[in-house]
Amino acid sequence: MPKKIAVFVGSLRKESYNRKMAKALPALAPESLKLEIIEIGGLPLYDQDLDDEGSPPAAWTAFREKIKPFDGILFVTPEYNRSVPGVLKNAIDVGSRPYGQSVWAGKPGAVMTVSPGAIGGFGANHHLRQSLVFLDVPAMQQPEAYIGGAGQLFDANGNVTNDSTRRFLKNFMDAFAAWVERNSVKNH
Ligand SMILES: Cc1cc2nc3c(=O)[nH]c(=O)nc-3n(C[C@H](O)[C@H](O)[C@H](O)COP(=O)(O)O)c2cc1C
């Protein structure tokens, strides 16, 4: 059985490079991984009162239930002001609560940042990793994926045009498949 991977894109932009990347990854991933993009743009901003009062928005509950059966998680995100875009941080916060019922704990994960800039979203990548430590998500260490120059990466159909980048991405997904396999013990 392939491992089911929930993919979270940290941009809501129609022409998002990160979404293009997330859509290009299944073709570059081994057959042992089945990737599915989970939409996060419709999640109301996290407000702990709603959980404490036992009346969480339906969108939060549906999101939490949706994530639970996945075997692993993959973040593909831009960097906003050297950190994680609010929309992605909100999704992470929603999934992490109510306290003790986090949907993230124990799921093997990986982080890829994609930016038109040269630094490739390094700041966001590492801010996100900081949250993953607290969330008990074993995050793949190597290879790191800071993808810069995103403006030149895709053709009109969203294919990754550059051979060396395609090789890198394939290698990243192979390593992630092995990482998920190795860290699957705590999966639900
Ligand atoms: C609010 C905001 C902050 C940004 N901050 C950064 C940044 O810190 N580093 C960076 O490389 N790009 C930054 N950018 C540029 C984004 O990398 C660029 O808009 C990119 O295309 C966003 O990813 P997307 O194409 O997936 O939407 C920022 C963009 C916005 C809208």
Image (cartoon, grey):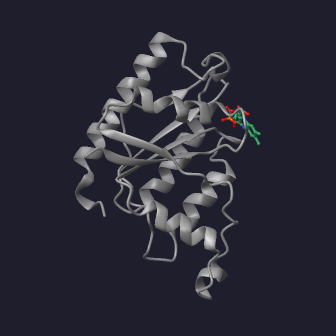
Compared with 4, 61 (above or below) is below
Tell me which residue sits at (63%, 78%) in the image.
48
Residue projecting furthest to the top: 163
The reply to whether residue 120 is visible in this rendering is yes
Residue projecting furthest to the bottom: 53
Split into 4 quadrants, where in the image is the C terminus?
A: bottom left
Judge by depth and name the residue closer to the eye, 124 or 154.
154
Compared with 188, 98 (above or below) is below
Compared with 91, 57 (above or below) is below
Question: Which image quarter has ligand 1?
Answer: top right
Instruction: Please provide percent x and percent y for residue 98.
Output: 51, 77
Counting every numbered tag in the picture gives 0
Instruction: Please provide percent x and percent y for residue 92.
Output: 55, 59
Give the quarter of the image for residue 19. Answer: top right
Instruction: Please provide percent x and percent y for residue 87.
Output: 67, 53
The reply to whether residue 95 is visible in this rendering is no
Tell me which residue sits at (67%, 25%) in the image.
116
Left or right of residue 183: residue 110: right
Judge by depth and name the residue closer to the eye, 64 or 90.
64
Tell me which residue sits at (57%, 64%) in the image.
93
Left or right of residue 64: residue 49: right
Give the quarter of the image for residue 69. Answer: bottom left
Instruction: Please provide percent x and percent y for residue 94.
Output: 57, 66
